[in-house]
Image (cartoon, rainbow, N blue to C red):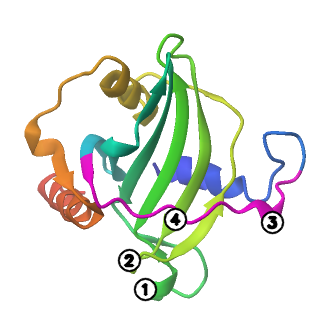
């Protein structure tokens, strides 16, 4: 997850998916932190990833979904390591095709501090392959194959997701 986030942060200074520099005036509205049902679908020593269940939209085989993520080690985007500058949660909108299962597109990504203030947003990236055993791989399995997960993976709202993630990190020694 850290490698993915560093890649995403590098997108801020790189050329956008259209071949032109991202237009700083097209910042999307701040996505609300989820208050409804979330499902933990992937996690490791870097973070926990939850599907925002009421934000999964499918048209034919094309799926757009939001992922709420909690990094296991909050990190600072600036030199000041104050709570206002520490990323503790992210919201990422992705698109993939259940029929093809070959690539995913990060449509946008927002990083938030513990108070829910958006610290940074990242524009759409170019399509990337879905690697085996990656977060995107597990997302596709859960969404496209309706892969059942235990009821204990379900929480309501981002606050409980953060609590569940921290308990999982502690339990696993991360």
Q: In the visual, does 24 lie left or right of 59?
A: right
Q: Mark 2 points at which residue?
A: 114
Residue 141 image-quadrant placement? top left
Cα distance between the residues tagged 4 and 1: 13 Å
The residue depicted at 12 percent of the width and 55 percent of the height is 171
Percent x, y for residue 31? 50, 61
Q: Which of marks 4 and 1 is nearer the N terminus?
A: 1
Tell me whether the residue at label 3 lies in contact with that at label 2, contact meaning CB atoms closer than 8 angstroms.
Answer: no
Mark 1 lies on a secondary structure that is helix
Tell me whether the residue at label 3 lies in contact with that at label 4, contact meaning CB atoms closer than 8 angstroms.
Answer: no
Q: Is residue 84 above or below residue 93?
A: below
Q: Earlier in the sequence, mark 3 or mark 2?
A: 3
In magenta, the rendered stretch is 21-38
Residue 129 image-quadrant placement? top right
The residue depicted at 39 percent of the width and 53 percent of the height is 68
Q: Earlier in the sequence, mark 3 or mark 4?
A: 3
Q: Which of marks 1 and 3 is nearer the N terminus?
A: 3
The residue depicted at 55 percent of the width and 66 percent of the height is 30
Mark 4 lies on a secondary structure that is strand
Task: Say how many tags the image has.
Answer: 4
Tell me whether the residue at label 2 lies in contact with that at label 1, contact meaning CB atoms closer than 8 angstroms.
Answer: yes
Cα distance between the residues tagged 3 and 2: 26 Å
């Amino acid at each position: 997850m850290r490698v993915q986030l560093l890649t995403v942060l590098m997108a801020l200074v790189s050329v956008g998916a259209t071949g032109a520099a991202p237009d700083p005036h097209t910042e999307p509205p701040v996505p609300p932190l989820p208050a409804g049902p979330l499902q933990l679908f992937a996690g490791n020593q870097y973070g926990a990833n939850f599907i925002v269940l009421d934000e999964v939209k499918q048209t034919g085989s094309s799926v757009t979904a939001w992922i709420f993520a909690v990094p296991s080690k909050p990190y600072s985007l600036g030199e000041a390591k104050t709570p206002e500058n520490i990323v503790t949660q992210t919201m990422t909108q992705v698109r993939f095709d259940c029929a093809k299962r070959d690539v995913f597109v990060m449509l946008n990504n927002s990083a938030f501090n513990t108070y829910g203030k958006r610290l940074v947003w990242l524009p759409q990236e170019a399509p990337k392959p879905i690697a085996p055993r990656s977060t995107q791989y597990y997302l596709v399995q859960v969404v496209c194959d309706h892969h059942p997960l235990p009821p204990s993976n379900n929480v309501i709202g981002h606050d409980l997701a953060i609590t569940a993630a921290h308990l999982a990190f502690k339990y696993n020694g991360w």
